[in-house]
């Protein structure tokens, strides 16, 4: 019997271990780097104890590495369950589920999230990664808000913009206490979102 499958399996296992070390190193550097120049592919490679070429092999570019860090945070934050939100026939409940999903995502690593979004203002490549992901959040909200009854195009746009602002990391970060946990902000964000939906429906918030 050929030993090739065994060798391939070991190689894939090694690749997976290297990828995990690189992602962990990248997140650690984002937590601890005192300036943007401190976060480089070379620094990540050194911290992960891998060759610089290994980082490029795994992720292609620095932007690809940052995309993978965001994906890793999404997995840690339970974003895989977001798809179920859109199958909920109760639109109000679906919007609450959407907010809860992003609360979990933002809470996956508050410090790293804060650093990534700060870097987005300094580096166009990082900015493109964050902007694209924020746009997906806006598109998801547009789908949900469009399901609400008696909504005009203008009302949909205004409501989406309000919910988009409310579900941002910056809002959760500002409303949460100084501890690393962002969960205390969730009730406040939910109440504000319900008020925005009441305004959209022409009702006075209770």
Image (cartoon, grey):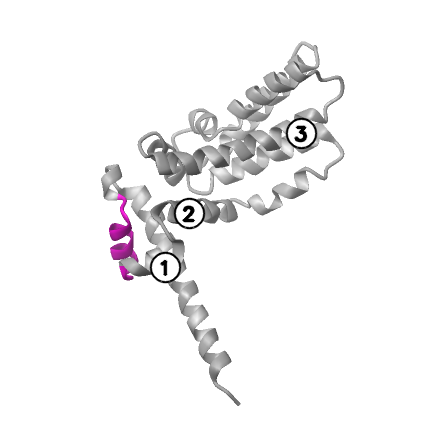
Label 2, residues with CA under 10 Å away: few <14, some 14-19, many ≥20: some
| Callout 2 touching callout 3 (CB < 8 Å) | no
Q: Disc 2 or 3, which lies upstream in sequence? A: 2
Label 1, residues with CA under 10 Å away: few <14, some 14-19, many ≥20: few
Above or below, 9 relative to 134:
below
Q: Position of residue 10 (x, y in %)?
A: 44, 74
Mark 1 sits on what residue? 57
Q: Disc 1 or 3, which lies upstream in sequence? A: 1
The residue shown at (72%, 27%) is 147
| Callout 1 touching callout 3 (CB < 8 Å) | no
Mark 2 sits on what residue? 69
Q: Position of residue 97 (x, y in %)?
A: 63, 35
- For the stretch drawn in magenta, the main secondary structure is helix
Task: Count the numbered circles shown.
Answer: 3
Q: Disc 2 or 1, which lies upstream in sequence? A: 1
The residue shown at (42%, 35%) is 128
Query: In the depicted view, which residue is nearer to us: 53 or 201?
Result: 53
Label 3, residues with CA under 10 Å away: few <14, some 14-19, many ≥20: some
Quarter of the image where one finds residue 173: top left
- What range is drawn magenta here? 39-51
Q: Position of residue 108 (x, y in %)?
A: 46, 42
Q: Is residue 121 left or right of residue 97?
A: left
Q: Is residue 2 left or right of residue 116?
A: right
The residue shown at (57%, 23%) is 163
From this viewpoint, is residue 175 visible?
Answer: yes
For the residue labelled by badge 2, is the local secondary structure a helix, a strand or a loop? helix
For the C terminus, the quadrant is top right
For the residue labelled by badge 3, is the local secondary structure a helix, a strand or a loop? helix
From this viewpoint, is residue 116 visible?
Answer: no
The residue shown at (65%, 13%) is 199
Mark 3 sits on what residue? 144
């Amino acid at each position: 019997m050929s030993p090739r499958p065994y060798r391939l399996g070991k190689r894939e296992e090694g690749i997976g271990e290297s990828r995990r070390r690189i992602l962990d190193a990248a997140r650690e550097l984002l937590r601890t780097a005192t300036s943007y120049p401190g976060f480089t592919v070379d620094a990540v490679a050194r911290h992960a104890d891998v060759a610089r070429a290994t980082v490029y092999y795994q992720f292609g570019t620095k932007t690809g590495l940052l995309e993978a860090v965001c994906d890793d945070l999404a997995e840690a934050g339970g974003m895989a369950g977001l798809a179920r939100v859109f199958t909920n026939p109760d639109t109000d409940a679906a919007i609450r589920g959407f907010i809860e999903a992003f609360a979990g995502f933002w809470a996956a690593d508050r410090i790293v999230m804060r650093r990534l979004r700060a870097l987005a203002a300094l580096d166009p490549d990082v900015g493109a990664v964050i902007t694209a992901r924020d746009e997906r959040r806006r598109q998801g909200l547009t789908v949900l808000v469009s399901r609400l009854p008696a909504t005009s195009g203008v009302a949909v746009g205004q409501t989406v913009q309000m919910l988009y602002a409310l579900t941002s990391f910056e809002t959760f970060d500002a409303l949460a206490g100084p501890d690393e946990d962002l969960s205390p902000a969730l009730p406040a964000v939910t109440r504000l979102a319900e008020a925005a939906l009441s305004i959209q429906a022409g009702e006075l918030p209770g």
